[in-house]
Structures are given as structure tokens and as C-alpha cells.
Image: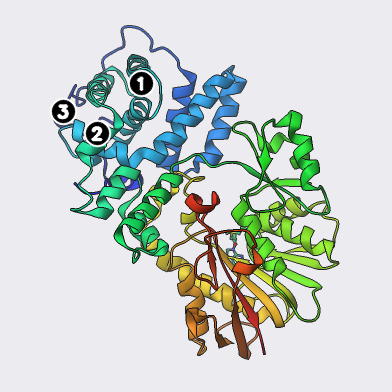
Amino acid sequence: MSTPPAKSARSAKSAGPGGSGKSAGPGGSGKPAARPHRRPKKDPARMVAFRALRAVDERDAYANLILPSLLREAEQKGMERRDAALATELVYGTLRMQGSYDAIIAACIDRPLREVDPPVLDVLLLGAHQLLGTRIPTHAAVSATVELARAVLGDGRAKFVNAVLRRISAQDLDAWIAQVAPPYEQDAEDHLAVVHSHPRWVVASLWDSLGRWQPDAAGRVAIEELLRADNERPEVTLVARPGRIATAELADSLVTEAPDSSPGRWSPYAVRLAEGGDPGGLTAVRENRAGVQDEGSQLVALALAAAPLEGSDRLWLDGCAGPGGKAALLAALAGERGAALVASGRQQHRARLVSRALDGNPGPYTVITADGTRPAWRPGTFDRVLVDVPCSGLGALRRRPESRWRRRPEDMAGFGPLQRDLLRSALASVRVGGVVGYATCSPHLAETRAVVEDVLREAGGSGASGGSGAARAVGVEGFEVEGLTVEWVDARPLLPGVPALGEGPDIQLWPHLHGTDAMYLALLRRTA
Ligand SMILES: C[S@@+](CC[C@H](N)C(=O)[O-])C[C@H]1O[C@@H](n2cnc3c(N)ncnc32)[C@H](O)[C@@H]1O
């Protein structure tokens, strides 16, 4: 068996609204829906979950954006909090485990999965998650999902759903996985893809980044821990923005608003929230003194700010600032030492988000809209520059459960040229002796080390050895800087106390090792 196809690919190939029109396996689905004998029972949680999954599939919606708006709408119509929590679990759990559930559903029907109508498949996935991934009793999971099917698909297809769910309910998740996943020894990547619900190419890329050259057992343990961590619900972490609120003060303010919060693992500014709640509603967050920010992102900003500089340290640039999370922390850190931040991004609407994030920053800052590959400033202007480049987001799979199914291997080639251009421009924008931080929220080697090595190598640099390279900023419209020499700075000592940062000089954070998103950071200093 091979990895099931991604969801959007299935939608494109699926049969029309009436299903496949062929003999339909258990229950049959080709007949027109019969008139229901009674109205299906309304179940707000499952209805919201279904609508969210449809929006993700049909409109490429982001679950973390569409779900809150559907929940707000349902709450206005009287949906209870408990139902909102169930809907959230159903959406996120289903999207995360979809790869495994697809393989299980495929084993329960007598036609290819891609021939199942996408709305029918979404109902089946929701049912599979309730049966295999929650503690909802079997009879309740089946009957509530069949009711949902009656409401959204009609009675004919509800019978099909009923028959498939009864087959799924015959055994638990472990037994199903043992049945449908190919043996590890036969095809390790396919095995891991089905067991841990990731597309096969994502498994392969993550494994390459982790270092699959490690002895097999260590390699397998590491990749399995990572894939498992990708399927866990991530913690919500706050950042206490220096100069606006002390970390202890933030923690105290949460005693009543968010009990059971705890200090961050690595960042001195981090506070981890206990499960649940709306972090946007917390007083310190509403006042912009604190923000919601993964600790990995905090560490990137902290490492850049901690890199030693000779000479002035007055002007910093965040060249890809939108929506402003790192810019807000950088501006606060800059403000503490009397420096100013220029926060720049290409998109106007994102610049507005950056302005909002920076509003109230005690130190000086400017927000501008500019294409980072065509800088609106003179070469050598800044003492510190961050480019947190657009990327595949494979480092944030915990937060964006649908993105693993939406991304394609060929997307990587699309990001590469822009990432290289942004890094070249950043190197040209920093003064001699200044430092550039190249960051991505992806551990994919094509977006991390390969970009840095290429930019150094094309100018005669020495790649990952940590040596220096003469980087020529070429092809940057508007100006050209020749003869830059660049040194790769070891970022690891700048994050004291953070373990397992790799062999340097760059650092790669990991969900399973650090509890953070898989952020990557390379620090480069212009030396001449
Ligand atoms: C990974 S996000 C940055 C996240 C941000 N640093 C934060 O912590 O909130 C990348 C950003 O780069 C912006 N971007 C894309 N192309 C750009 C370009 N050519 N110049 C500047 N910014 C660009 C995107 O709009 C996006 O806001």
C-alpha cells in the first residue's frame, strides 16, 4: 500500500455530487437520496467540524482561521462551550490523522478512495477520528456521525457512512495500523507515513534534516519522535515584551486569567499557558505588552540580538516583518539598548499587522512596506538584520494540521530563489561588522542550509565549515555591492542552556527536542 493521496488531489479527481455513480461498496451510494423519515438531529459540534473540513478542502481555508469564525457564528446561535471544544478536537484531530484514517477507510470500501465524494470522505474521516482517536463511545460516534451524514449528505449516503463506520469500529487504531501500514523493513518511509499520518515526501525530507545517516535505531527513534510530536496539540506560549512587562509580572497577571501557566523552557521572556482559553482575550495581550509567540521564534530574535558586534548597535532591520511577532520582540530588545528597529515587509495588509504588534513599543521604530529583494535603503545601513523568509512552513505542522496535505514537493523549488535573493539583500543591507540572521519556520534542507551555502558558495565562500566567504550581492536591482566578505557565526553559544542545537554553526530547533516549532537560524557577519 502506498501513502494515500493528499486531500485536495482527491477533491480534484473525485466523482460528482452524487458519489461515484458506480456500485458503491458497503451500503451503496449511487441512488438518489430518499426523503428522510424524520429530520436528522442537529449536532452543532459535528456540523461545525464538517463545515470547517469542507472549507479547508474546497476553499483552501486555514483551519486555525476558519474554525474560530464558524465557532463564533455557532456560539451566537447558542452553541455551548463544551460543543466548541469538541468541534475543535474533531477538526484538528481529523486533519492531523487524516493520512492514517485514509488508509483505514480505503481498507473498508471496495473502490479507490479518490472515487469517494469529498463531502462523504469528510464525514467518514470525522467518524473515523471519533472511533479511533477519541474516547467517544462507539455507538455514540457511529450514530452521531450517521445523523450528520443524513443532514449533509442525505439518507442514501448516510447508509454507506453507517456501513463503513461499522467496519472501522471492528478494531482499534493500533490493530488497524498493524493491518494497513506496510512493514517498516519493507518500506520505512511508507510505513512511517501511514503510522504517523504524514505524506511520504514530508517524512523523507524531515528525516534528511534530522540526519538519517545516524545508526538505524537512533535514526528511526528520532524520526518517530518528531512525527509523533507533529501530531500533538502544541502549547500556547506568550512572550513578555521587554520594557513593556516583566516576565514575572506577566505570570502574576495570569494567576486569575489563565491559571496553571508555567515559565518557558528556554526563553526568559516566555510563559506557557495551560490548555484552553483564548490568549487574545488576556489583558496583557490585549494591551500589547505581551504577545502569542512560539518559543522557537523568541529564540531566533534573542540569538540575533545577542550576537556580539563591534562598534555601533543603533539600527536594526526586520526585512520580512509581517505579521510582526519577531519584530515586536526585536523592537523591544532594541529599545532597551537605545537602538531603533525598521520593520519592513512586502505586503501592505501585513504592514498593518506589524504596526499593530509594535504599537506602544517604548523604543523608536518605523514600519515600512518594501520588497526586501529591492531594498529601499542604502547598502550597509543596518547593524543587525533579520530575514525570516517565506517558506513551506513544514516546521509548524503542529499548528497548521492541513498544511502537510496541501504542500507539494515541487513547492520547495518555488521558495528557493526568493529565499536566496532575500538573504543576498540582507547581507548587502548590513554594515561591515554587522550581523544577519537568516531564519525559516522549516527544517527542510532546501530552505535552510542549502540556501545559506549557495549564497556563500556562489561568491566563493566555504559552505558549512563556518569559514568566511566573499559574498557578492549580485542581481539586486537598484544597487550592487561587490566584495562583501561574510563569516558564518556559531549561533549555539548565543542560546545558553538550550540543548541539542546540532553541530553548528547554524541551529535547528525541533518540536520533539525543544517543544518549539522547527525554526532554523543561520547567523552571518560581514567582515569586510
Ligand atoms: C515567515 S513570514 C515572517 C514572519 C514574521 N517574521 C513574524 O515573526 O511575524 C515571511 C514574511 O515575508 C513577507 N515577504 C514575502 N516576500 C517578501 C519580499 N520580497 N520582501 C519582503 N517581505 C516579503 C511575507 O509577506 C511574510 O509576511
Q: Is mark 3 within 8 Å of ligand 1?
A: no
Q: Is residue 205 left or right of residue 268?
A: left
Q: Residues within 10 Å of mark 3 (few under 14, many from 20)?
A: some
According to the picture, the residue beneath numbered tag 1 turns out to be 145
Q: Which amino acid does label 1 sit on?
A: Thr
Q: What residue type is labelled 3?
A: Gly
Q: Is mark 1 on a helix, strand or loop?
A: helix
Q: Position of residue 404 (x, y in %)?
A: 41, 50
According to the picture, the residue beneath numbered tag 2 turns out to be 176
Q: Is residue 512 above or below residue 334?
A: above
Q: Is residue 111 above or below residue 444?
A: above
Q: Which amino acid does label 2 sit on?
A: Trp
- Spatial CA distance of label 2 from label 1 is 20 Å
The residue located at (70%, 75%) in the rendering is 376
Instruction: Tell me which numbered mark, 2 or 3, is placed earlier along the sequence.
Output: 3
Q: In which quarter of the image is residue 344?
A: bottom right
According to the picture, the residue beneath numbered tag 3 turns out to be 25
Q: What element carries label 3?
A: loop
User: Disc 2 vs disc 3: Cβ atoms closer than 8 Å?
Assistant: no
Regarding residue 115, the answer to whether it shows in the image is no
Regarding residue 392, the answer to whether it shows in the image is yes
In the depicted view, which residue is nearer to us: 415 or 303? 303
Q: Which of marks 2 and 3 is in front?
A: 2
Q: Is residue 378 left or right of residue 456?
A: right
The residue located at (47%, 49%) in the rendering is 397
Q: What element carries label 2?
A: helix
